[in-house]
Image: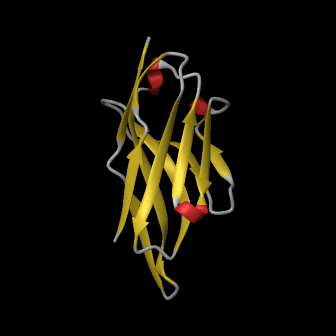
Amino acid sequence: QVHLVESGGGLVKAGGSLRLSCLASGSIFSINGMGWYRQAPGKQRELVAAITSGGITNYADSVKGRFTISRDNAKNTVYLQMNSLKPEDTAVYYCNADGYYSAAGGYFHYWGRGTQVTVSS
């Protein structure tokens, strides 16, 4: 089993910054992609940013230029630096990761429990 634990959420004023972290632990041989999604009240969960094991990134248009995703493969950790936050960024942010349990295979895909980000105007 693999566990994803997010941290770093909180309350911040518009224009402020937060840094989210997500640590993956458990039976991990390798991690392919890691990413951040968010879900605001009454809305569907949406991709915020994703990063491959090789460092290729992908961002939602709404966060380009403001958010930066990065990862530390040695620590099985992915980060999301969020700058110039807006009230519309308010949501629960979820970490996501997929990979393999062992060299023999065994694919996994897990979600974290989420961390609340609230941006006040």
Report the residue at 43% width, 38% height from top. 8
Looking at the picture, tell me which residue is in the foreground, 20 or 61: 20
Looking at the picture, tell me which residue is in the foreground, 56 or 12: 12
* Residue 34, percent from left and from top: 53, 56
Report the residue at 59% width, 27% height from top. 83
Report the residue at 41% width, 65% height from top. 25
In the drawing, does residue 30 fall left or right of residue 95? right
Q: Quadrant of residue 32?
A: bottom right
Looking at the picture, tell me which residue is in the foreground, 83 or 107: 83
When the figure is inspected, residue 94 is found, relative to residue 25, above or below; the finding is: above
When the figure is inspected, residue 30 is found, relative to residue 103, above or below; the finding is: above
* Residue 88, percent from left and from top: 46, 22
In the drawing, does residue 63 fall left or right of residue 4? right
Viewport quadrant of the N terminus: bottom left
Q: Find the residue positioned furthest to the front.
A: 75
Q: Find the residue positioned furthest to the top.
A: 121
- Number of disc labels: 0
Report the residue at 40% width, 34% height from top. 9
In the drawing, does residue 39 fall left or right of residue 20? left
